[in-house]
Amino acid sequence: MSAKIFGSRFAVSALALAGVLAGFPAAESPASAQGPIPTASAEDRALARGIFKELIEINTTDTPAGNVTTATTAMQKRFLDAGFPAEDVHLLGPDSRKQNLVVRLRAATPTTEKPVLFLCHMDVVEALRSDWTTDPFQFVEKDGYFYGRGTQDMKNSDAALVWTLLKLHQEGFKPRRDILLALTADEEGGKFNGAAWLVEHHRDLVDAAYVINPDAGGIELENGRALVADVEATEKVYSDFQITAVNRGGHSSLPRPDNAIYELTAALNKVAAFTFPFEMNEVTRTYFKSLATMETGSTAADILAVIATPPDLAAAARLSNQPSFSSNFRTTCVATRLNAGHANNALPQTAQAIVNCRIFPGHSPEEIRRQLISLFADDKLTVKFVSDAGVVSDTAPERKAMVPPAPIAEVFEPLTRITQAIWPGLPVTPEMENGASDSIYFAQAGIPSYGYSAIALERDDVRAHGRDERLPIDSYWKSLDFFYAFVKELGSN
Ligand SMILES: [Zn+2]
């Protein structure tokens, strides 16, 4: 690592980083990657802005007005026009409006080494003109921001990576291993999730040593100051369970001990009182190791006790009083919806609740469903799985997300170094996401995935899925510089 980047005034951040990188082999980087990284020229920026504008102005919502294929076809044309061979530019998918694009920047010589895959969804969440100050499907530059649906999530990164691959190709850069870019449909919703479909039907096209997914992670700003760069290195699995009690019912003037509402609420109270066992994986361990250097007092002491071997479970219990710690320590399940009875003067014939679980990597939804059944210990209740599409089934998927390996040095070393060349001294922290992204389909296929957008955003200006979505123009330029340097290094590793 370059001393130019780690000046002594960044001692605190460097310490945090030392925690993150503890145990990693010393980095061996090409000399060209040391020190400052190249910045995009005015001409580069104009091209990258044009790609961004084109994507924002193509409606890719999962609505009659939206069409992902229009966007992927436009990008396909850019790659073919730039001279990418047709066999390296694949447009494919299960539905004519939801075609995915997979582009390959081929290695200088054929290699058995697996490619690096950049995974980017092209669809966006619906946006209504009446809710917005500007037209959400017009690319508007105003007050130092780019406005439009997808400027944060995630046409910014789609455009940045299309630009990066075009630029590397134009410069004649030949990586040592293939670099793949997948631009996919239906991450936000819809029936044709491109990432899932590609893994299932065209594994050969998207098979990779690891995945970089810019749909997560990034740089948190507070009043313009960069605080931390988060990298999502694993994620929990989202699952909904439908709990149902049924009863023959009757007149409410003749109550009996058997009652669907009482049976259901007894079960829900067991969920409330139950805590899943403490767990830690290599990603959460690295995250807490880094966090310990930034916390103080009893919190720091408890974190250190928790990451020790064996972990101090009393310290884990104390930290678990804070939801942000507790959700990082275990699977969580919580009642989120309730529906029961049909009349004020009748015994309830049905009582139903939804219990939402966020499952720690390494466990399947079916395993958690069975755990709920044994917790309830009441065979009058049914516990069913509800899919993302709302389909209810008697059993849940058996597939589980892989237990993540320790963050790979060949990804984290350049990621950290390039990030810090742009934001000097910024701590870079791998973390476990409690939400869900397309990374999960690769994690379930045993391919590690890292979520990092290199986009700097104010903590209180996250507008993804919301109105007047916008991106600071400067954040877009910086992400171009990041991806150009990062893709080049991953391709040279
Ligand atoms: Zn997204």
Image (cartoon, rainbow, N blue to C red):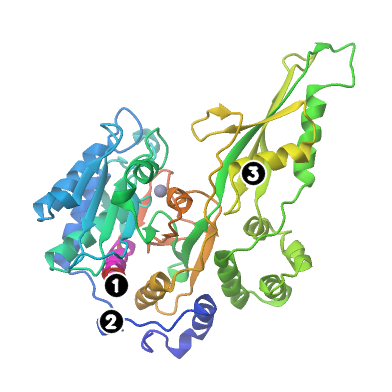
Residue occupied by mark 1: 489
Q: Kindly report the distance in space between the C-alpha atoms of the residues bearing marks 1 and 2.
A: 8 Å
Specify few, some or many for label 2: CA neighbours under 10 Å numbering under 14, 14-19, or 20 or more: few
Amino acid at the residue labelled 3:
Glu
Q: Main secondary structure of the magenta part?
A: helix
User: Which comes before the other along the chain, label 3 or label 2?
Assistant: 2
Can residue 259 be found in the magenta stretch? no
Q: Which residue is mark 3?
A: 367
Location of residue 464 with respect to 370 vertically, above or below: below
Cα separation, mark 1 vs mark 3, equals 40 Å
Q: Amino acid at mark 1?
A: Glu
Residue 9 is tagged as none
- Residue 253 screen position, x and y as percent: 89, 11
N-terminal of the two: label 1 or label 3? 3
Q: Residue furthest front?
A: 112
Q: Quadrant of the C terminus?
A: bottom left
| Foreground pick, 470 / 388 | 388
Look at discs 3 and 2 and give the one toward the viewer.
3
Residue 307 position in % (x across, y down) = 66, 72
Q: Is the CB atom of the residue marked by disc 1 within 8 angstroms of ligand 1's nearest atom? A: no
Instruction: Classify 10 Å Cα crowding around label 3: few (below 14), some (14-19), many (20 and above).
Output: some
| Label 1 CA crowd tier, 10 Å (few <14, some 14–19, many 20+) | many
Q: Is residue 415 above or below residue 438?
A: below
Which amino acid lies under the numbered mark 2 shown in the image of this protein? Pro
- Residue 217: where, in percent of width, then height? 45, 60
The reply to whether callout 3 and callout 2 are in contact (CB within 8 Å) is no
Of residue 25 and residue 171, the one placed in the foreground of this image is 25
According to the picture, the residue beneath numbered tag 2 turns out to be: 30
Q: In this picture, is 48 found above or below 406?
A: above
Q: Which residues are magenta?
A: 475-487
Quadrant of image for the N terminus: bottom left
Quick check: marks 1 and 3 in contact, CB under 8 Å? no
